[in-house]
Each structure stands twice: as structure tokens, then as C-alpha cells.
Image: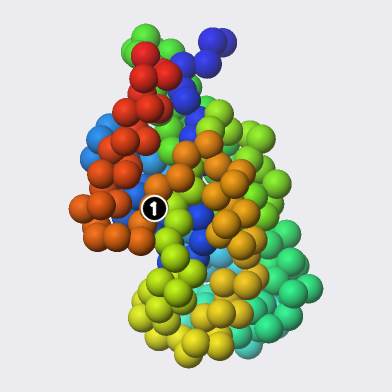
Amino acid sequence: MTQRVQRIALTGGIATGKSACLARFAELGARTIDADKLARDAVAPGTPGLAAVVERFGPGVLRPDGSLDRPALGALVFNDAEARRDLERIVHPIVYDAIERWFGELEREAEGSGQPMVGIADIPLLYETGQAHQFDATIVAACRPDQQIERLMARDGLGRSEAEKRIAAQLPIDEKRQRADFVIDTSGSLDDTRRGVDDVWRQITAAVD
């Protein structure tokens, strides 16, 4: 079957504005999917993913209602690189399987309609998981390192040292910039970011057309 869906991955660093970019792409007409949501779904109550997490990390990562205690799990994995890798080995295959099924659905829809589509998957750890080659193009949302720290502290209520630790668990944003096909600078205002998204969208859709 001829490919009718342009497969795009949106990535960046933690708290660099990926969600704002994804929302704007959706407004412009892209089909979008968020790997963070898929990761949450992968460890929802009753799932094999949550069972595997509890088996590896113990019942202390559960809330009284049986759902995952994310702060408790985060305290474990961001202070232990091996624990973080174990968690990723549980969650990432589930997430990428879901993304692949989603793109397959888009391909069938596009084939039925005879119209090309653009599908954009927001995948925070795209480069870290070695999956960039699965996509037609990659987009990195990036801001200044000092902004990234401040945004993460404000968003998650973290101290500076904890925020720095979580950022350090990912590839440096400058390395991601160098690997990307497109870069959206999110250092300015939301309007600036939206204009950056609009520019990338024009380039992507020109290639599709």
C-alpha cells in the first residue's frame, strides 16, 4: 500500500513546550497523538504494564486506590539510572506499539479517502529510545536551558536540584537540535511559538502536496 501519511515525530526536552506545539499542529490540521498520555494509559489500573511496574518496584509505588503513585515512582527512577531503564523497558514497547497502530489506522483512513495526511506523534524520548529512524521527519521544540529549568520547577513544583536531575536524565537539548529536521524555538511568547509551528507546518505540508 502506498504511504499516504507523513509520519512526523515531535520531541524536545522536558518542559520545553512540546504540548503547546502539538496543540497548534492539531489546530492547523495535523492528526496528533501524545506519547505521554499513552505512557499513562500503559500503567493504568488493571493493565499488564502496571502489574509489571509493581513486580519490579514493589507495592510502594501504588496509591491506596490501586493506581500508580507517580511521585513515588519518580523519586525512585530519577535517583537510580538502572531503575529508570527498567521502567523504560516496561513502558516504551507498549507506547510504540500503540503509536504504530495509530499510524496504521491513519494509513487506512487516508487510503479510503484518497487524501494525504500528516500524523504527528509527540514523543519526549524519541532520540533516547533510538526510534527517530521510524519517522519521515523529526521536530524539536527547544528553549534556553535556564528557561527549561524554571518552567519545570514551576510546572511540577520541584526544587532546582531535582529539576536539573530530571533534565540531565535526557539527552542535552542542543544535541536534539542538531539531530532534528526542524526546530521550533519556544523561548519567546506563546504567539512566537505558534508562529514557529506555523512555519514548520507550511514546510511539511508543501512536501506532502
Eyeballing the image, is 104 above or below 2? Answer: below
Q: Answer with left or right where residue 112 lies relative to residue 7.
A: left
The quarter holding residue 119 reads: top left
Q: Which residue: 74% across, 66% down? A: 85
Q: Position of residue 163 (x, y in %)?
A: 52, 81
Three-letter code for the amino acid on which mark 1 is drawn? Asp
Q: Position of residue 94 (x, y in %)?
A: 62, 51
Toward the left, the furthest residue is 191
Q: Which residue: 21% across, 53% down? A: 191
- In this view of the protein, can residue 74 be seen by the observer? no
Q: Answer with left or right where residue 191 lies relative to residue 35.
A: left
Q: Which residue is mark 1?
A: 185
- Secondary structure category for the residue under label 1: strand
Q: Position of residue 182 (x, y in %)?
A: 47, 39
Eyeballing the image, is 86 above or below 102? Answer: below
Q: Position of residue 185 (x, y in %)?
A: 39, 52
- In this view of the protein, can residue 81 be seen by the observer? yes
Total numbered badges shown on the rendered structure: 1
Q: Answer with left or right where residue 163 lies relative to residue 17.
A: right
Toward the right, the furthest residue is 82
Q: Which residue: 50% across, 30% down? A: 7
